[in-house]
Image: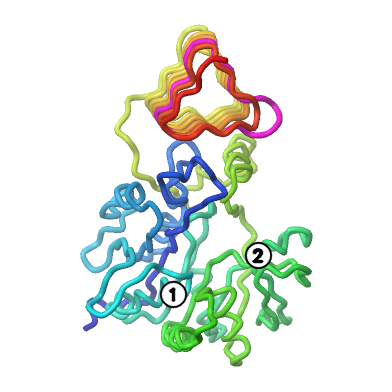
Amino acid sequence: MIRNKKRCVAMILAGGQGSRLGVLTKYRAKPAVPFGGKYRIIDFTLSNCTNSGIDTVGVLTQYEPLELNSYIGSGAAWDLDSVTGGTFVLPPYMAKDSGRWYSGTADAIRQNVFFIDLYDPDYVLVLSGDHVYQMDYNKMIRAHREKGADVTIAVLKVPLSEAHRFGVMMTDGEGRVTEFAEKPKEPKSDLASMGIYVFSWKKLKEYLKKDAEDENSDNDFGKNVLPAMLSGGEKLYAYRFSGYWKDVGTIESLWEANMELLDSRGVNLWDKDLKVYARNPNKPPHYVGFGAEVRNSMIAEGCNVYGKVEHSVLFPGVTVKEGACVRDSVIMQDAVIEENSTVIKTIIDEDTKILEGARVGGDGEITVLGANVTVEAGAVIPEGGRTEPKSTVKKG
């Protein structure tokens, strides 16, 4: 049964645990982590689909999916709730004869072949839901079609010293991939995979089936499917991307990406052609009180600032009271920084309270506080500290 034939269906891999983000992902999937004052990480991939005219999107969830599923809802915030397409959350499920968790990126797609076949697409766009970037996928799809490719891989030049963290490839003068290695110890190229793939659907189905028959497979695109296609003589091409792209999978990279917004080095949230859409809380305008100081910061709706905020990102509903100082920090929704307290180079999750006279963080290593934490009056959390969600930090 074909529901509505589509040129392209997008599949977003959004089930990652994001363990390197520590306390920020204890109760939420990595793509649901807040970013940039009003967004979630997955907003960038969903918005890219909208801006590229791709209206049928599967979101594959698994780890701690409740917050992510609730946030995505019907997809209306991204204009992805059309009658002939839409956004579909696709968790693992039990079928009549079997059922299991997704065991890898390729397996996640393979378990949803029936969903993709409903739209009989020419191409399948496989995306990660945990990267910050803006991209018109139509240009990549056009390049894929013009070259008659079986798979096109978006690539970015990275320092050779960092290439071991990625899938890297060698290409010929036409951009055709001649060698591919997933996270090699000694990379021979600085062309790194961005985890963005355009597949010709019939060819991908063929190799997903072959991969399922291999008992030793890790069920992964980078480790198994792409190398198998290359060795099978299929046409793999690299598509070079030159814009801002960041994997915000660590505390350091998440903090850096937020700070880069303030220094005009980050993703361009003001790009009228590649707007970033989000599902936002209904909050009143932010308020900066008499005597407050705000410098080089992003202050979202619903914030009340009476103290000092410098080079920081404040999410909706944050309160910074008189005499309090926030610097080089990311303060997520509805957090409260009370009188005469100090927060420096810290990421604070939602609904956390820093009570009067407390001291959090320092100029060295990044400090992170989970959601619903209470830091009692006069308490001190040194730089680099990690505080579990729903906990209380006492003085002394």
Where residue 117 appears, x then y in whole percent? 31, 80
Question: For this rendering, which residue is in front, 134 or 382?
Answer: 382
> In percent of the image, x 49 and y 35: which residue is there?
388
Residue 306 visible in rendering = no
> In percent of the image, x 25 and y 75: which residue is there?
95
Q: Are marks 1 and 2 in contact (CB under 8 Å)?
A: no
Residue on which the image places disc 1 = 107
Q: Amino acid at mark 1?
A: Asp
- Of labels 1 and 2, the one closer to you: 1
**In terms of image quadrants, where is residue 384?**
top right
Residue on which the image places disc 2 = 166
Residue 281 visible in rendering = yes
User: Which segment is the magenta one?
Assistant: 350-367
Location of the N terminus (image quadrant): bottom left
Look at the picture and state if 112 lies above or below 292: below
Where residue 29 appears, x then y in whole percent? 43, 51
Where residue 238 appears, x then y in whole percent? 63, 75
Look at the picture and state if 269 lies above or below 308: below
Chief SS of the magenta region: loop
